[in-house]
Structures are given as C-alpha cells and as structure tokens.
Image: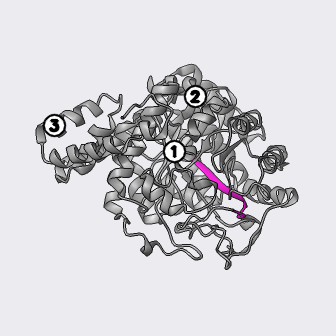
Amino acid sequence: MYNPKSLKAEEFICDEEIKETLAYAEANKENVELIDAIIAKAELKKGLSHREASVLLACEMQDKVEKIYDLAEQIKKEFYGNRIVMFAPLYLSNYCVNKCVYCPYHIQNKHIPRKKLTQEEVRKEVIALQDMGHKRLAIEAGEDPVNNPIEYILECIKTIYSIQHKNGAIRRVNVNIAATTVENYKKLHEAGIGTYILFQETYHKESYEKLHPAGPKHNYAYHTEAMDRAMEGGIDDVGLGVLFGLDKYKYEFAALLMHAEHLEAVHGVGPHTISVPRVKKANDIDPAQFDNGISDDIFCKITACIRLAVPYTGMIISTRESAELREKIIRLGVSQISGGSRTSVGGYQEEERPHDTEQFDVSDQRTLDEVVNWLMKAGYIPSFCTACYREGRTGDRFMSLCKSGQIINCCHPNALMTLKEYLVDYAGEETRKIGEALIQRELEKITNEQVKKIATERVCFIEEGKRDFRF
C-alpha cells in the first residue's frame, strides 16, 4: 500500500501506485482541461504531485509542452535567479565490490586499472582544481569496505578542506558514496560535508536487482532508504537522482517524485538537489545494451517537468551531456552544472585527459574558463558560492528561505562576489572582460540599497586582494 510517510522502501516507492499513475497519465494525456488545470497549479510555484507531473510528462500537445518549458524557465528564475552554481567531481578510488552492470567499476571488469588516491595525490588533485577556480567539489568513490572504508573518505575530506593554495580553497565538499549506516552518516555530518548525494539508478525493484546482481548494492531496500538514514544522522541536505536509460523513463520519473514527496512528508525537507544523468559509454559498458535510452527531447521534457513538480530543488546537469545539449536544457530549470570535469581517478593532475580509469565518457570537454565564458554570454551568472552551507542555511532553513523567494537576497550578491574572485584569480582575458561588465549590470539589479552598497564595496575589496565575503 502506498504511504509516503512510511520508512519502508516498497511503501513510499509503491509499484502499484506508480503503475496506476502511469495509466492515469496515459488516459489523460490529451485531456486539455486537466492539463491546463495542472499547469495553472504549477504557476502557483508550490509544486505538483507525482501523478499531476506524470500527466504533463505524457502530454504530447506541442503548445502545452512549450507552456511547460516556458513555465520551467520562469520558476527557476524566480527561485534561483539567473545564477548557475559551478562544481567539479573528484574521483578518489575506483575499487568496488559490486557487480553493477552499467558501471565500469564493477568488480568483474579486468580491463580497467584499479587506483586509489593517496592523501598526497588528493592534495595534488585539489590544487589542480583550485588552480582552475573551483570552490565546490563532489567526491566520488566505489564501494569497497577494505580499500574505501569510511575512515578513508573522512581522511580525504579533512585533507581537501586543509589545502590553501595561493587564493584557492575548497569551501564545500559534497559526497557521493554508497549507502551506509546512520553512524557513518553522523561521521560525514561531523566532517562538515555539504550535500549527501546518492543516485537510485532505478526505482523499479525487479530491474534494480537484475542490474545489481551481487554486492552490497544488490539490497534494494537498504539503498532506497539511505536518505532517511542520512537525515537521521544529521545530514539535512540530500541529493536524489536516477540513471535514465536503465528502465522506462515514465516509471523512473514518477518514482523519483514520490521519493521527493516522501522526504518532505517524513522530514519536512525535500531533496536539496535532483540530478538527471543518462547512461553513457565507458570502459566495458555499451549504452546500447540497455533498451530504455531516451531522446534529447524527452530528456528536456523530464527536466522541465521536475522543475514544475519540485520548484525549490537544485537541478544538476553534468558533463555527461554534450555542450549542445547543455545549452538547450539549461533554461528548463537547471541550477547547477559541472565544468572542466574529469571522471578518472587522479585525472586532474595529468596534462592530457586520461581515459583508462574514467567512470564514463565526458561529452562536454570544455575547460572551466570556457564554460564560465559561455554561461555569461548566455546571460547567466556563474556562481562559486558556498555561503548557505557555511552560514547554516541548510535543510529546512534553506527550504523556507527558498520557498518564500528570499534566498535570492543573499544568493545574488554572493554569486557576484564569488564570480569576481574567479575573474581576478583565474579567468582568461576575454572571460574577465565579459564578467566585469556582467557584474556591474547585475549589481544594479539588487533592489535592497544596503545590500547593493555592501556588495559593491566588497567587489572593490576583492579587486584589492581580499577574499571570501558572504551574506
């Protein structure tokens, strides 16, 4: 029986409810009156249920789809402005004991060299990332209790936070590691992590168990209930995601929104972020072996419908996607992207991009400076801000500010100040020129005169060599 307040995976991700939802969506995909009513509800910016959003996803009437796209763009701007938060993944180890059939790190893959960073190598990777201009990382590691125990992850986090190089500093470490215990989540929380991210891969239990034939990840319930344990352990910002292409996208979409509803119902805080990765080519992995791949058009519609359903969440598109697709999809609700990413263990230290330990092929291979340049030309503010974490604006405190539209009063000036840091310390000549003009234009848009005055002064202080201001 479907129960969003249950702590049992098969009750808050209820197969019967999902199937009923998909049947309802199919039956109503041309019901103009209902679709208009759902769009009108979405315009209130309070979100949609998984069933309502599924109707919009099923809808193929082009005029309605365009309305959905325009509304997704509008909602994103109202909650997050024209800011795009920048981050990079940092791969610590590709040792893994699982047999996930879509991931090249699976234990049976003998083609891939296994590697685990020492603390000195972590240091070198972090300095390379700092020299690009990054301030926010998402650390990644395979699941291996011998090679990658929680103590190793905690040691790496401590190392990352300790490194001050020139004007560089990693101010926030998000963590994407396997489902673990409440006790270990407490340790991660005490280590000062930002968001705990865990992709479900697929919510379809039967498919999940086939795709994870052996290893601790085989346990569907343990994996699906991980966010509840993370929140019990004190982590109040969590990030959801499915790997689109493993199972039917409409099923995954409905289940993903049910998971968001569950977190809201039980903890009073929905997902801080939702990622929308697609299966990509990698060593020993051919995406064609999965017959549920989705087109770019469907991918764009999924993104827009998530934005309508969960208006407050941060939405992430990684460098798995091409520059062309990222340019197309970014207006439909995306608020975070990676830039200059390498998905290999130790990849940032190398002058040439190594491919032998990549988790997946990176489609968008532009440098961070090229991505920042592109975003600004497209009218976005690349933001390196981490202030909310450091000011305690997490969990329900962040959500209450975000849902009331107040978060923009601190995020907008913080984005401009961190962009100024990037321009002074790391940007190429053309990027700096574009960015300086953008900052001056955007400072004028700050409606609170006191905030505008302080932000303008701080931008000048950054030019003089001072760093790390925040509202």
- Circle 1 residue: 240
* Residue 24: quarter of image: top left
- Whether residue 354 is in magenta: the answer is no
Q: Amino acid at mark 3?
A: Leu
Q: For mark 3, does the 10 Å Cα neighbourhood hold few (<14), some (14 to 19), or many (20 or more) residues? A: some
Q: Mark 2 or mark 1, which is nearer the start of the sequence?
A: 1
Query: Considering depth in this image, is 329 or 354 the residue closer to the camera?
Result: 354
Q: Position of residue 200 (x, y in %)?
A: 51, 50
The region drawn magenta spans 83-96
Q: Residue 395: which numbered mark, if any? A: 2
Q: Which residue is mark 3?
A: 34
Q: Main secondary structure of the magenta part?
A: strand
The residue under the point 15% across, 47% down is 27
Viewed as shown, does residue 310 lie left or right of 418?
left
Q: Amino acid at mark 1?
A: Leu
Q: Are marks 3 and 1 in contact (CB under 8 Å)?
A: no
Quadrant of the drawing holding the C terminus: top right
C-alpha separation, residue under disc 3 versus residue under disc 2: 33 Å
Q: Return the x and y of residue 59 as percentages of the image width and height.
A: 21, 50
